[in-house]
Amino acid sequence: MTAPFFKFGYFSEDIGLVLAIVIGIGFGFFLEQAGFGSGRKLAAQFYFTDMTVLKVMFTAIVTAMLGVFWLGVAGVLDLSLVYVSPTYLWPQIAGGLVLGAGFVIGGYCPGTSCVAVSTGKADALVYLGGILAGIFVFGELFPAIEEFYISSAYGTLTLPEVFHLPYGVVVFAVVVMAIGAFAAAEWGERKMAQKKENKT
């Protein structure tokens, strides 16, 4: 049996939707368990006082990357059938900046705001209302910005293609980068804790 299972027709679209709901609930549960339902905890990463978000999310990314890579090497996963979002360079940079600004200001990203709303946090409800309002405004303005929205299209790019490197080399580089990021996060947290102690 080769993955991705849905692409090979091992289960129907209805079963796929049920699995998506179950996985989504599980994902939300673990986000809450990690403390990501707290806007204060999420915003703390921007002040370098609590880098849990970076550590948890980077760990998840690296784990998924290693799983996909080695399953592909073992012939269990057909990497050519794994969906990769098309690259629209400048629109995606602009969207990333808007999302990042919203994250810094509001303390949530779209996913964590839904987690926080499910636990009754009023600030997250306001944030989610802002997301819905933004979606509405985007839809209304889309005809005026459509040309920009589809500009700088590069198709489905991957880092190995961009840097002309084997997949294994890129995977190794990302793992090294993650280890460095974890070490830097620990160092930053210690420095900020010492600075806080010195002030008191």
Image (spheres, grey):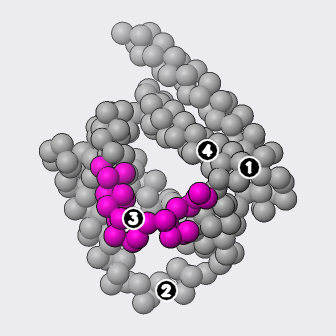
Give residue 5's position: percent from left, percent from top. Answer: 52, 62
Q: Nearer the viewer, residue 72 or 118?
A: 72
Q: CA distance from mark 1 to mark 2?
A: 40 Å
Report if residue 98 lies within the magenta region.
no
Residue 196 falls in which quadrant of the image? Answer: top left
**Mark 4 closeness class: few <14, some 14–19, many ≥20 residues within 10 Å:** few
Quadrant assignment for the N terminus: bottom right
Q: Which residue is mark 2?
A: 146
- Above/below status of 181 relative to 137: above
Among the two numbered marks 1 and 4 on one chain, the one whose residue lies closer to the N terminus: 4
Q: Which residue is mark 4?
A: 67
Dot 2 and dot 4 residues touching (CB under 8 Å): no
Q: Which residue is mark 1?
A: 73
Give residue 195's position: percent from left, percent from top. Answer: 47, 16
Point out the frontmost of discs 1 and 4.
1
Identify the amino acid type marked 3.
Gly
Which range is magenta? 1-25
Residue 187 falls in which quadrant of the image? Answer: top right
Dot 1 and dot 4 residues touching (CB under 8 Å): no
Q: Residue at x 75, y 40 (%)?
A: 172
Q: CA distance from mark 3 to mark 1?
A: 25 Å
Callout 3: helix, strand or loop? helix
Give residue 12's position: percent from left, percent from top. Answer: 40, 70
Among the two numbered marks 2 and 3 on one chain, the one whose residue lies closer to the N terminus: 3
